Image (cartoon, helix red, strand yellow):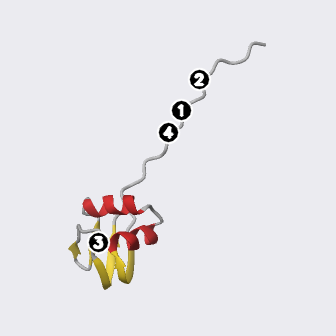
Amino acid sequence: MKAVVRFQAEGVRLDQAVAEACGVSRARAQAWIAQGRVRVGERVVEKPSYRLKGEEVHVEPPEERPMVVPEDLSPSPAL
């Protein structure tokens, strides 16, 4: 199931509002906007600099992939 973030904002850029509401960098928010993951009202807005006018914003963040941590492959100390 996808998480959807909904919020309202006024007088700020779309990318700034998405970044703040979702706790991500502005660059990541801009990528989501470019990917069509952000709707303002009922329409997809692909311009990160769009100034919000109190509309409801819907964000569908991509599913996060679990981080894979490589095993420690260093040789064990000799006993």
Residue at the spot of label 4: 68
Closer to the chain start, of discs 3 and 2, is: 3
* Location of residue 60 in the rendering, given as x and y in whole percent from the top left corner: 34, 65
Q: Residue at x 47, y 46 (%)?
A: 66
Helix, strand or loop at label 1? It is: loop
Q: Residue at x 22, y 78 (%)?
A: 42
Query: How much space separates mark 4 and mark 3, taking CA atoms?
Result: 34 Å
Q: Which residue is drawn at 24% across and 63% down?
A: 36
Q: Does residue 52 appear anywhere in the picture? A: yes
Type of amino acid under label 4: Val
Helix, strand or loop at label 2? It is: loop
Please tell me which residue lies in front, 4 or 40.
40
Residue at the spot of label 3: 49
Helix, strand or loop at label 3? It is: loop
- Do residues under tags 3 and 2 come within 8 Å of each other at their CB atoms? no
Dot 3 alpha-carbon crowd within 10 angstroms: few under 14, some 14 to 19, many 20 or more: few
